[in-house]
Amino acid sequence: MDNIDMNDLERRMQGAFDSLSKEFAGLRTGRASVNLLDPVVVEVYGAKMPLNQVASVAVAEPRLLTVQVWDANNTKSVEKAIANAGLGLNPQPAGTLIRVPLPGLTEERRVELVKVAAKYAEAGRVAVRNIRREGMDTVKKLQKDGKMSEDEQKKNEERIQKMTDTWVKKIDDALAHKEQEIKQV
């Protein structure tokens, strides 16, 4: 009798990977990506709002983002928010359109970005391993409580380990791809 929800474990490991993918998308590699401005929060209408709720972001060229502000009154606030977001960007307003050129990366900055990417990947691996540990603990408890045979316990532990190995490999592959991307620009 199989009382462990493998689909739940798989879904949670997928969630850890998706979270890592979002973190990677926000890492500036010198190539324009609309996700680069995701952390920008703009103060408008007396409240703080994510940039994507007051403007649309597009990739105009490989190293140029454009931000189309929907309300002309918010252009100054959006420009200020991008400049102060700690991303090292220098927005250039032209009416309600703001051009955001991406400066090239120095070798020093590339090395720094690779280290940050490695930290993100390790956090992803830790999250996957924690989910694995919870699954293994559940299997052991079910076996100990007599709700699962030893054979079923071994089979489930092997499935959980195989699932963990698959997700850790996906994380390692994503990290290798991101490192390549950072070094190529």
Image: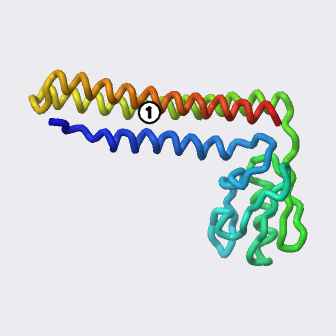
| Residue position marked by numbered label 1 in the rendering | 128
In the image, 152 versus 55, the foreground residue is 152
Position of residue 169 relative to residue 17, above or below, is above
Position of residue 72 relative to residue 19, above or below, is below
In the image, 22 versus 76, the foreground residue is 22
User: Which colour style is shown?
Assistant: rainbow
Residue 84 x, y percent position in the rendering: 77, 54
Answer left or right for 147 relative to 39: left
Residue 171 x, y percent position in the rendering: 55, 32
Residue 94 x, y percent position in the rendering: 90, 69
Position of residue 101 relative to residue 45, above or below, is above
Query: Where is residue 130, by image quadrant?
Result: top left
Answer left or right for 123 relative to 96: left
Q: Amino acid at mark 1?
A: Val
Residue located at (59% from left, 43% from top) = 21
Query: Where is residue 174, by image quadrant?
Result: top right
In the image, 33 versus 69, the foreground residue is 33
Position of residue 129 relative to residue 64, above or below, is above
Please count the marks in the image.
Answer: 1
Mark 1 surroundings: few (<14), some (14-19) or many (≥20) residues within 10 A: many
Residue located at (68% from left, 63% from top) = 51
Point out the image quarter for the C terminus.
top right
Q: Residue furthest left?
A: 146
Residue 151 x, y percent position in the rendering: 18, 22
Label 1 sits on a secondary structure element that is helix
Residue located at (53% from left, 44% from top) = 19
Residue located at (47% from left, 33% from top) = 167
In the image, 80 versus 34, the foreground residue is 34
Point out the image quarter for the N terminus.
top left
